[in-house]
Amino acid sequence: MRGELLTLVSIGALIACQNARAEAVAAAPAGQAAAPSKRYNTTGRDIPLGGPLTDDGFILGDISYTLTKDDRLIVDAPAFLALLKPSLAPDVWSRLAIAVGPRQEISGEELAALGFTVAYDQATFGLKLSLAPELRPRRTISVTGGYGPTIGALAEPSPFSAYVTAYGNIDYVHRGFDRGLATPNIQLDSAIRYRGLVLENEASVQDRFSRQATRLVYDDLARTARYSAGDLEPISRGFSGVSPMAGASIVRVYSDLEPQRNIQPRGQRSFTLVRPSTVETFVNGQSVQQTRLNPGTYNISDFPFAQGSNDVRLVIRDDTGAENVISFSINFDRSLLAKGLSEFGLYAGVRAPFRISSRTYTDTPIASGFYRRGFTDELTAGGNFQLSTNGGVGGVEVIWAAPVGTIGINLAASNIDRIGNGYALNVGYERIFGSGSNVKSLTATFQTTSRDFATPSNAIASNPFAYEIGASYSQGIARDHYVSLDGYFSIGRGSTPNQVTTRATYGWRSNRRILLTAEAAYERRPSQHGFGLRIALTYRFDRESSAQAEVDTLRDRQRLTYQRAEGRGVGAYNVSANVDRNDDAVGLNGTATYIGNRAEIGAAHLTAFSTDNGNIIDQRTSFRFGTSLAFAGGHVALSRPIYDSFAIVAPHKSLDGATVYVDPREDRDLARSGLFGGAVAPDLSPYFPRVLTYDVPKAPTGYDLGTGTVTLVPPYRSGYFVEVGSDYSVTYTGILRRRDGAPVSLLAGKAIELTRPQRAPVGMFTNRTGRFVAEGLRPGKWRIEFPNQDERFVIEVPADAKGLVDGGEIRPEGAQ
């Protein structure tokens, strides 16, 4: 019922708006361009209007203006400047802003004199703008369509937020080693954030509390750098390796700090349009985007390249039918950096190894790091190292997108006390060619390691193989078939035997439900020797469930598996079961996980039978759970596990505790408020835009929830508090009459809160009978006024008003 009333209210407001505009153009037939002598406004009075401001058919936004009784246009100057800013080159917009100055209104004639032509648009009741290409800025178009600039105001994270997440499991052994109830194990992950500074901790509880890591983290986005102090998490590149350490670090890794940014070479190209055109982009013969563009100069970038060589074609068609084609090629590798970009990491401190599940701090200094830079779009190179008191290792890396394929090289040398000098070399090659279902992939690798190569964390050198060589080739055949060939050969050192693995695989998807995979393999390794076949048949019952049967003769193994994953959010679950048989035993296993509003719970059961006599040799049941306690904006809420950032979404007091649903769907929602606090969105990823939607189905009829969305770009381990609803939630309707009793018809006005006149007014329209709808009011007195009208009206929203209020007939101030 509430939804129907709100719909009627909205339709009423729209009709009122349309009626007001319709009177202004009554003299012009609908759908027909008016002759120059034809009048738009025949009412004999100025009419305040509002509508879209369009630029060659593209809507820039809504703007208020007045259509005067002599068909002149008076435009809202501040709004015009704001809407035009993205469409003008910066210097052009600055000249316009200086010319307009502090004025609140500007005429169409004045704008034309400044070079900006606006005209009344009879079809949309808005304004049409015409701009020359040279007035427009150079723009960049993203072909991948990834995450563009966020639209609208962003919510701010709470200055202070915190959470603690607990993952627990407990096992009960029915039969087998250590029978009975095992000691529960709980893993703890927590973070406290205050104005950009994050204190994060990891710990475990099993018999006793054990702290595993504590560190301070600060992200400097202006310099794209992350500073850490405490128990570090070093990143390794090449052969340099990492060692657990405590100290300080500075790191730039774009995937962590700017995950939206395309750091690979983008093949950027520019072109200029002199008239509106459609640009279609083809990559490797596939159409990836079709975009309608205004006149102007454009950089086109972020092509969805496949690994390897790519052919790009831009087909530009203008409205006259003329066509222009721009073609070019580029090699692409996902590990390349665009020219001029760099990533790095520097870690320094003391060794802090794990011993008996906890940190042990030593006085042994250690440092490690890496640096890589895109020197050209085809060449990325850098170096890496690790040093300690017992020696060190240093290396270089090179990635070259050559015309024949991508070549990667890692070379390192080491000098470690009591071990000696050593070296290591790895050369990789990759080429992907073809397109669509016939794409082909060829990879190869060669690695050699000397006997005494080691890193500072190694007590001894362990390099059992002198040389390792591998290659892989795969190819799609039509739409439903693929084949692949793999081969790996390792030459052992000393007593280590040579090892060989070869495999040929064929896959056939007979339809959308059935996939058959057949594999022939030969292995010669200490643990496996011989030739065998593996055949797997997968059947998909629907989008949520599938089953697989597998036979592997090389490992003498047979398996039958069923799995089902249902839904997302509250009430989702997944289950799986399998029967697994090998030489020694037959296993019957099952798992189930349920996603609740405040926790995740799961269970697994394993039973193993001896193949000799059928007796149970191992049987155990595991119970698992995960939950979080979150704090933001002075509010506490229980949640299912939080992994990084989160948002607490809670109802305003005026909703009387009605349940808030976050990201509601027909049969699922992400979270909901209730006894244990607001709804918690626990899965926000740092620096990725996220739009959360919310609804309150049991809100009072006519209650104004606002936009029903909130846009976030969460910083690292941040927390948000979002309050749904406010004091300004009343929808007020009534009929305005003049002193003589005539309706105040077909006018656009505004409602101003008398106790807070500085607050932005609420817009509203009247229809022919004087009825209006004003949304977003709160209890108290409001004044309704109209441009160029002397009469003013005062309405009073009752103190206990909620949702929809009908004020009846309303007369001007001072009327009897």
Image: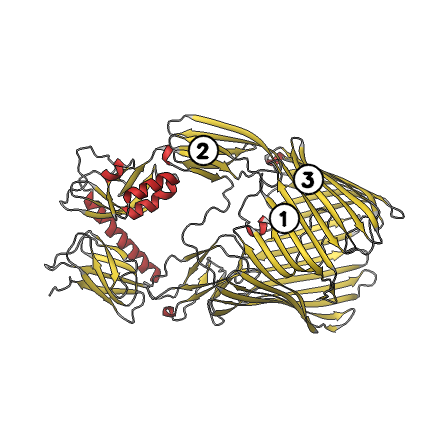
Query: Is 161 rendered above or below residue 479?
Result: below
The mark that comes first in sequence, 2 or 1, is 2
Q: Quadrant of residue 87?
A: top left
Residue 398 got which mark? 3
Query: Is 12 rendered above or below residue 136?
Result: below
Residue occupied by mark 2: 279
The mark that comes first in sequence, 2 or 3, is 2
Instruction: Kindly report which numbered mark, 2 or 1, lies closer to the viewer in this rendering.
Output: 1
Instruction: Indicate the position of residue 309 as horizontal and vertical percent values.
Output: 61, 33
Instruction: Kindly report which numbered mark, 2 or 3, lies closer to the viewer in this rendering.
Output: 3
Distance CA(mark 2)–CA(mark 1): 38 Å
- Residue 529 visible in the picture: no
The mark that comes first in sequence, 1 or 3, is 1
At numbered mark 1, what does the secondary structure look like: helix, strand or loop? strand
Query: Is 322 rendered above or below residue 659?
Result: above
Question: Residue, x 83% and y 61% (percent of image)?
Answer: 612
Left or right: where 559 falls relative to 644: right
Distance CA(mark 2)–CA(mark 3): 36 Å
Instruction: Indicate the position of residue 139 as horizontal and vertical percent values.
Output: 44, 38
Residue lying farthest right? 495
Q: Amino acid at mark 1?
A: Phe
Residue occupied by mark 1: 344
